[in-house]
Amino acid sequence: MHPSAIYAATVDSHTFATFRALVEAIIPDSPVSATYSPELTAGAADLCIHEYMIWELDHSLSLVLGFGLTDIPLSCSTAGLLNVGAVHLAASRQLQHPPNHLLWESGPFSAISRNDRISVLAMLEQGNIDPGVLPPPYRNDLGFTRYMIDFLNRQTMFGNYSEWSAYGTTRLRTPTERRLEYFPVSWKQAEYPGVVPGYRALLGYMLTIERKGGESTIV
């Protein structure tokens, strides 16, 4: 089995659905029109950025336990954080739209509208929830909760506009084993031409220097 498929098979379906809903809310797709091709209207979920987020949370973050760093997969607990937030928003009657009850069992966060998902992120970031109801390691730690919500927002944007999706079938391998398989779709969307050779040193700026007597002035 391909390494990407092996890792994907280990991810809990509830976690997968929750992160897909997350990136879909932060960077939604655009309606297909006669002006833009379907490729240029793709959102983060279309580019599988939810897989990137799960990978990052399970491989790139560490928690300080005792006297050292300990690698603890965080995707499942973070999905739980978002789902608890969605339940709280619904229980406090702050939802803007009725949830999809067919999806509620798969995960409350994925069952609510995109706007309500953003409201959940804002609520958790602002600490407008009893920290005692949050799942470990977020329980009674609003500081860590705020950090994670900020991370989810920034990392979704970073993953979407990086070259990660273009690694294709190698995207879930270790960084040294990834290979670009095509030009990144998000680079086309942003009209970024791609990597270009850099200069070895700054060659300086064009300046005009006026010298009068023993003094010089840059103008």
Image: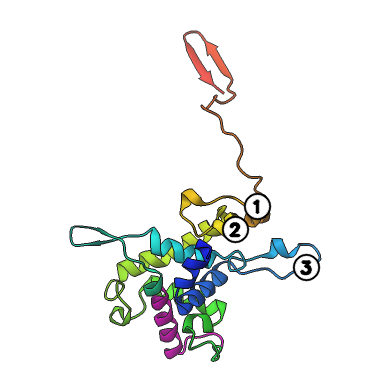
Q: CA distance from mark 2 to mark 3?
A: 26 Å
Give the residue furthest to the top: 213
The image's mark for residue 182 is 1
Residue lying at 47% horizontally and 64% vertically, measured from the top left: 53
Image coordinates for residue 135, horizontal then vertical, percent: 32, 78
Sequence-wise, the earlier of marks 2 and 3 is: 3
Residue lying at 52% horizontally and 52% vertically, measured from the top left: 178
Residue identifier under label 3: 33
Magenta segment main secondary structure: helix
Q: Is residue 10 above or below residue 39?
A: below
Local crowd at mark 1 within 10 Å, few (<14), some, or many (≥20)? few
Q: CA distance from mark 2 to mark 1?
A: 8 Å
Residue lying at 18% horizontally and 58% vertically, measured from the top left: 67
Magenta segment, which residues? 79-97
Residue identifier under label 2: 168
Residue lying at 43% horizontally and 61% vertically, measured from the top left: 56
Local crowd at mark 3 within 10 Å, few (<14), some, or many (≥20)? few
| Way the structure is coloured | rainbow
Observer-side mark, 3 or 1, equals 1
